[in-house]
Amino acid sequence: MVDDDASAVVAPDAPAVLLLDRPDAGPDAAPAPAPPAAPAPLALSDAARDRAHGPPSTRRGRRGRGTRTAAAPDANAFVVQEPPRDHRRRSRPAASRRALARSAAAATAAVLLGAAVAPHATAPTAPSDDPVPARLPAYAHIDLYQEGVTVGAGGRRAAVAPGSAAPFFAGTHVLDPAAVTLVDALGGLPRTASSPGSSRADAAQRAAGQRAWLAAGTVPGAGGPYEDMARAALLDLHTLVLPGGAAVAGWSPRWRYVWPRDSAFVAVALARTGHVDDALDVLGFLDRVQAGDGSFEARYEPDGSGPPDDRGLQTDGTGWALWAAGTVLAEVPDADERRTAAAQLRPLVVRSTQHALDLVARTGLPPASADYWETPEQELTLGTAAPIVAGLEQAATVLPLTGDTALARSAAAAAARSRVELVRAFAPTGYARYAAGGHRDAATAFLLPPFLRVPPPGARTAWRESAPTMVRPANGLAPGADWRDDGISWTPQTSLYAWLAAESGDAPLAHGWLDFLDAHRTSTGSIPEKVLADGSPAAVAPLAWSAACALLALDALDRRDDDLRASDLPPLG
């Protein structure tokens, strides 16, 4: 995790409201409050580590408080995205004037070029009449590092600077050079980057390639309120997966690395949206960088040359690689093609399985290791134990496809034993972060399908009860209940919970988290890593892990809808 540059301290306009369907809510229960109109975000700082997937302190216990597709857009049109409002607080009249000026400039460009104006930013809302609490908590500020990422000449990725206009070709994340020139000439909008040396014909060809890639798969949520978010998330993943399968976490320098954990989620999201070959490329990269003993470093350079620093090994990476391999192969319907893909993944699966067996050989559980919090740990965390069990369960299904039946039996036996030991260690604490006890943690999600095949006793209740302890002012989630009280919502955990709600069949709860993600995207439609307490997007955008989980949530909703429709069909004959 990186610590970002600190800035002004800000306080929220009103207390947060958690929209969560409680399991004990009966028919007579009072209706849940309506979601706030995209609460305005606040600010944060994270300055000591390189990544935004973990907490700032290593001292635990301290309060720091488908198949459906939509019609393709007009290939000759481009979309002028409205730049976001300044994230620091100012008077609403001034904000309104700036928004009107930007909208007018964007509309002028649209009229001249026959384009559609589709800003993602929401219009300013009227001030609340609710009394402001006498003492409000103070929160920090983190800048938004970029609005999104585009692909330029020669496949070069380039960040769209914060506050910049993004005149993309419609349905793509490729800038239209002609539109960029016109918008800059009109003025009234911040200047945006273009692709140096790129002609409009070249850019149009790249745009056509992105449209063709989308059309080759499925867009989850197509035809519904989240279609635009799904299309943007797919394009972001397509951009963040580099040639050779390196799935970088983001495009800011400190995120431009490959985390095995994030890559696993990206691979599964690609496979479930019809891009299995891309998913296999992502896993192929992990195969190439994995150590001979089956272990993984925390992260890798995108060229595959090795780790960028001395963070060291992170045990959960081995579990995530196995889980992703099995989940991706499950998306290959043809048996012969599945065996061919399994053979391609065999070195990765065999090494990872053997390493996982070594890790759990002594006690049934792996030793302590840093997990997605990205902090050194002296005690075993749920975020390390659960992925290893999930990985061994998948290994037991993948290895028979490669002819490694003896190793498959060993994996199945180890998975069963490790599952028992996980329950023995963590269930007495209500599946807290540590076996010794402690606070609730987002890793409770890893105890449920599609991670573990069958939830352990009490796991569903623990997962549901964890969310209220992690909610933040903008209504997103923090990684754990004991995370610092900085007002920051983290989209990886919020999107993860949206996916789990969808997989569990709780569509209203999934929609609540998806509404949060949709409402706090950047001007290019990307999901940022963080959302401040006042609702402002912050830090890196897009973040691959968040985009992947949002897509997986929408895919799970689609699949359940399809299953329900199939169950309503009259019997044949």
Image (cartoon, grey):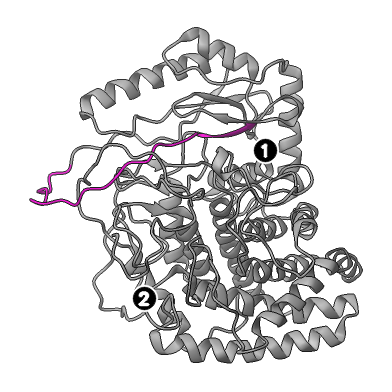
Res 548 quadrant in image: bottom right
Q: Position of residue 332 (x, y in %)?
A: 80, 65
Q: Position of residue 352 (x, y in %)?
A: 75, 72
At 32% from the left edge and 57% from the top edge, which residue is drawn? 472
Disc 1 from disc 2: Cα separation: 41 Å
Pick the quarter of the image with the C terminus: bottom right
Residue at disc 2, secondary structure: helix
Question: Quick one: label 2, few (<14), some, or many (20+) residues within 10 Å?
Answer: some
**Residue 227 drawn above or below residue 348:** above
Residue at disc 1, secondary structure: loop
Q: Can residue 448 be seen?
A: no
Instruction: Tell me the residue that label 2 is attached to.
Output: 465
Say whether residue 145 is magenta: yes
Q: Position of residue 256 (x, y in %)?
A: 61, 43
For the stretch drawn in magenta, the main secondary structure is loop
Instruction: Tell me the residue that label 1 is attached to.
Output: 72
At 37% from the left edge and 66% from the top edge, which residue is drawn? 59
- Between 262 and 208, the residue placed more toward the observer is 262
The stretch of residues the image draws in magenta is 128-150
Whether the residues at callouts 1 and 2 have beta carbons within 8 Å, the answer is no
Q: What amino acid type should be assigned to the residue bearing mark 1?
A: Ala
Say whether residue 301 is magenta: no
Question: Quick one: label 1, few (<14), some, or many (20+) residues within 10 Å?
Answer: few
Q: What amino acid type should be assigned to the residue bearing mark 2?
A: Glu
At 50% from the left edge and 72% from the top edge, which residue is drawn? 445
Residue 123 as seen in the image, left or right of residue 552 = left
